[in-house]
């Protein structure tokens, strides 16, 4: 039997217990099977009986039963902060892996009344994942391990796993760069190394290349790739000659502002910040376009997706060339 509680005092105690459990350096690495059980407990209930997990963690701060908006927001933040409660990056990544696998597996069972709070929980975990990578100075190995969590079978951006809910993929794409921008902005001038933007986008590029769903490809392009590329390379200004024809306009996207990702773009490199320097937005735009072309050219890219990626590359490249001619 599982026991549930909506009492804040009980939840706070459970969070503290779980934080101590995860940060205990004397404990062996938690096996994947045990982390899965732990996360199912967090997902649904407040208490787990002894023996559910071989580590005999008795209390889990369940999210399913949280009801009031302020309680939901606080609990979502507290659960996400657990990622940073351990000194071992491997434990943090294991905890993130458990979160994503559980979210993918249980997503379709979330009723509409609870959906908003789980969308918020996903957003919080995306944000804290970036903070974990920032804490590790954007270490390339850590970034790649996190990408593997997102893209392996059972992960939310796996292109070959038909069990991944499309709505979850769309939500991740919608908030991914927003949360990255928040974290980079919070650093202000303290950032020691640039953001490896192409590395962070790699799971989405692979998904765009290999997804069999037209709707998924279209959403990735319209909500992620096009807004970012437009932010990298805004429309060219007119010449001083009022009689001179205007240069072709860059395609407009449904985005609140082309400066949406200004902090990312002013602090970004391509792949590995340990050996690369910050790139100007125009140079970054060209290199991201090249990466799109390279992924489209891979043998495993689906033919229909390859054509769409080439079309995106060509449209953006032609506008780049128009801008270069004007200058």
Image (spheres, rainbow, N blue to C red):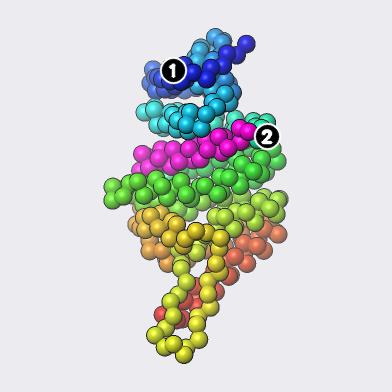
Residue drawn at the location 42% of the way across and 88% of the way down: 241
Count residues near mark 1 (Cα–Cα under 10 Å), then give few for <14, some for 14-19, many for 20+.
Answer: few
In reply to whether residue 168 is colored magenta, the answer given is: no
Of the image marks 1 and 2, the number of the one nearer the N terminus: 1
Residue lying at the far left of the rendered structure = 189
Judging depth in this view, the residue of 225 and 1 nearest the camera is: 1
- In the image, residue 136 lies in the stretch drawn in magenta: yes
Residue 10 placed where, x, y %? 46, 16
Magenta stretch: dominant SS? helix
**Residue segment shown in magenta:** 113-137
The residue wearing badge 1 is 9
Label 1 element class: helix
* Identity of the residue drawn at 50% across and 15% down: 59
Q: Is residue 256 visible?
A: yes
Q: Nearer the viewer, residue 73 or 249?
A: 73
Residue 35 falls in which quadrant of the image? top right
In the rendered structure, are the residues bearing label 1 and label 2 in contact, judged by CB atoms less than 8 Å apart?
no
Q: Nearer the viewer, mark 1 or mark 2?
A: 1
Nearer to me, 315 or 89? 315
């Amino acid at each position: 039997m599982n026991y549930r509680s909506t009492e804040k005092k009980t939840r706070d105690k459970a969070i503290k217990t779980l934080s101590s459990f995860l940060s205990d350096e004397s404990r062996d690495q938690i096996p994947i099977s045990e982390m899965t059980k732990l996360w199912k407990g967090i997902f649904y209930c407040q208490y787990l009986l002894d023996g559910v997990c071989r580590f005999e963690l008795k209390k889990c701060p369940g999210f399913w039963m949280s009801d009031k908006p302020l309680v939901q927001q606080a609990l979502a933040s507290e659960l996400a902060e657990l990622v940073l409660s351990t000194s071992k990056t491997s434990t943090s990544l294991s905890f993130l892996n458990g979160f994503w696998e559980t979210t993918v597996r249980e997503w379709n069972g979330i009723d509409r009344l609870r959906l908003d709070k789980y969308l918020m929980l996903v957003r919080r975990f995306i944000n804290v994942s970036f903070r974990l990578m920032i804490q590790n100075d954007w270490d390339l190995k850590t970034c790649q391990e996190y990408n593997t969590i997102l893209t392996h079978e059972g992960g939310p951006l796996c292109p070959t796993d038909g069990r991944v809910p499309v709505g979850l993929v769309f939500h991740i794409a919608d908030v991914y760069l927003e949360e990255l921008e928040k974290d980079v902005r919070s650093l202000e001038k303290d950032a020691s190394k640039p953001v490896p933007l192409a590395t962070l986008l790699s799971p989405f590029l692979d998904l765009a290349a290999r997804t069999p769903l037209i709707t998924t490809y279209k959403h990735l392009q319209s909500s992620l790739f096009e807004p970012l590329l437009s932010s990298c390379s805004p429309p060219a200004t007119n010449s001083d000659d009022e009689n001179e024809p205007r240069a072709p306009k860059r395609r407009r996207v449904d985005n609140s502002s082309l400066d949406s990702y200004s902090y990312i773009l002013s602090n970004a490199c391509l792949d590995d910040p340990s050996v690369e320097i910050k790139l100007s937005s125009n140079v970054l735009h060209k290199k991201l376009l090249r990466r799109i072309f390279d992924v489209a050219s891979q043998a495993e890219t689906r033919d229909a997706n390859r054509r769409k990626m080439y079309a995106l590359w060509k449209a953006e490249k032609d506008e780049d060339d128009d801008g270069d001619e004007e200058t």
